[in-house]
Amino acid sequence: MSRFSTLHATSPVTLYHDGHCPFCRVEVAWLAKHRHQERVTLVDIQSSDFNAADVGRRFDDMMGLLHVKDGRGNWYIGMDASRALYAVLGYRWLVWLSCLPGLRGVMNAGYRFFARRRVRLGQWWEKHQANK
């Protein structure tokens, strides 16, 4: 996969998200109101109706990193999932920037850092929001 392959993601995409994650819920709420919301199908992997095996994945893998499947059946995982999602929403120039050498590595590392800590960060964030 080339570093710019996410620019070629096709709609509609399916975004597999953790409905228990506070950050994911904020993003999903924004996506549900987005002017191109018809380009994205949202699937909560925490839903009792969801079975990761039905889409050829493992639940633990999907909990660890964001997963997006595009209209051609291509899977994008981690930061590339975010890139593919934003490409189909019309932000291709930002995706292109995020693919440039140097910036790509920093963003990928930042995503992995966040993904490993999102549950703890989310709990802290919700507690902080409740105290406002």
Image: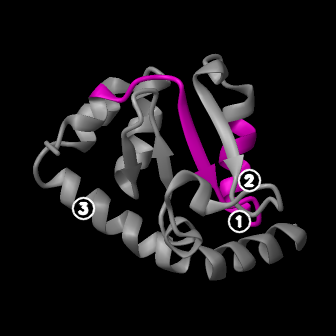
The earlier-in-sequence mark between 2 and 3 is 2
Question: In the image shown, does 16 or 28 lie closer to the viewer?
Answer: 16
Q: Secondary structure at mark 3?
A: helix
Residue 111 % position (x, y): 40, 64
How many residues crowd around disc 2 within 10 Å: few (fewer than 14), some, or many (20 or more)?
some
Quarter-wise, where is residue 5 in the image?
top left
Residue 76 % position (x, y): 38, 48
Q: Is residue 96 above or below residue 78?
A: above
Q: Which residue is mark 3?
A: 106
Q: Is residue 27 above or below residue 89?
A: below
In magenta, the rendered stretch is: 8-30
Residue 19 belongs to the span the image colors magenta:
yes
Q: Which residue is mark 2?
A: 25
Image-based side of 21 in relation to 80, left or right: right
Image-based side of 1 in relation to 22, left or right: left
Q: Is residue 13 above or below residue 122?
A: above
Instruction: Give the amino acid at mark 2.
Output: Arg
The answer to the question of whether label 2 and label 1 lie on touching residues, with beta carbons closer than 8 A, is yes
Query: Measuring 33% from the left and 32% from the top, which residue is drawn there?
Result: 94
Residue 70 belongs to the span the image colors magenta:
no
Q: Extreme left residue here? A: 101
The answer to the question of whether label 3 and label 1 lie on touching residues, with beta carbons closer than 8 A, is no
Q: Secondary structure at mark 1?
A: loop
Question: In the image shown, does 21 or 40 lie closer to the viewer?
Answer: 40
Quadrant location of the N terminus in the rendered image: top left
The answer to the question of whether label 2 and label 3 lie on touching residues, with beta carbons closer than 8 A, is no
Query: Measuring 34% from the left and 49% from the top, which residue is drawn there?
Result: 80
Q: Which labelled disc corresponds to residue 21?
A: 1
